[in-house]
Image (tube, rainbow, N blue to C red):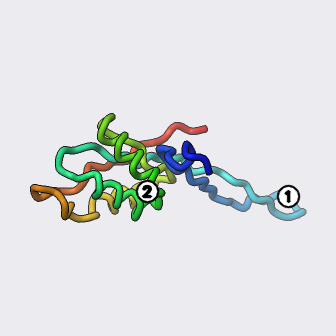
Amino acid sequence: MSEAEETSAAVAEPVVITQTVPQGKTGTTTERKRQPPYNVIILNDDHHTFEYVIDLLVKLFAHSVAAAKALAAEIHTRGRAIVYTTHKEKAELKRDQVLGYGPDPLASVPTGPLGCYIEPAPMD
């Protein structure tokens, strides 16, 4: 895997729903449809440490440490970053996991949750 692939900003996850459709007297056929993708976006703040954000990205999103560091830098410099792309239900779960991750033990002042939201991603 190249370094560029390791530090990609979002992880796309293919999602399909299968439906059985009648096909006359001979049987059935399966039709596949993709669910619309959603981006999970983390916002920058002045309270959480880089270490906290990197740990969160590794544990909740299974990013490599190198990818998590690159995303943490993007969050810091651009004010936000897309950290994951998936179907809506899983994006909501990941957002809720970020919001419930707990306080930053290295922060100099008590911290609330890291800012996180989801939004529809462009379709292919």
What is the x, y in percent for residue 22?
A: 78, 59
Disc 2, disc 1: CB below 8 Å?
no
Residue 64 or 83: which is nearer the viewer?
Answer: 64
Image-quadrant location for residue 17 = bottom right
Please state the total of marks drawn on the protein image: 2
At 41% from the left edge and 45% from the top edge, which residue is drawn?
Answer: 70
What is the x, y in percent for residue 34?
A: 62, 50
Residue 117 or 22: which is nearer the viewer?
Answer: 117
Which residue is denoted by mark 1 in the rendering?
Answer: 24
Which residue is denoted by mark 2 in the rendering?
Answer: 65
Label 1: how many residues lie within 10 Å, few (<14), some (14-19) or many (20+)? few
Residue 89 visible? The answer is no
Secondary structure beneath dot 1 equals helix
Residue 50 or 115: which is nearer the viewer?
Answer: 50
Secondary structure beneath dot 2 equals helix
Q: What residue type is labelled 2?
A: Val
Q: Residue furthest right?
A: 26
Q: Earlier in the sequence, mark 2 or mark 1?
A: 1
Q: What residue type is labelled 1?
A: Gly
- Please tell me whether residue 83 is drawn above or below residue 20 in the rendered image: above
Mark-to-mark CA distance, 2 and 1: 53 Å
Q: Single out the mark in the foreground, 2 or 1.
A: 2
Residue 40 visible? The answer is yes
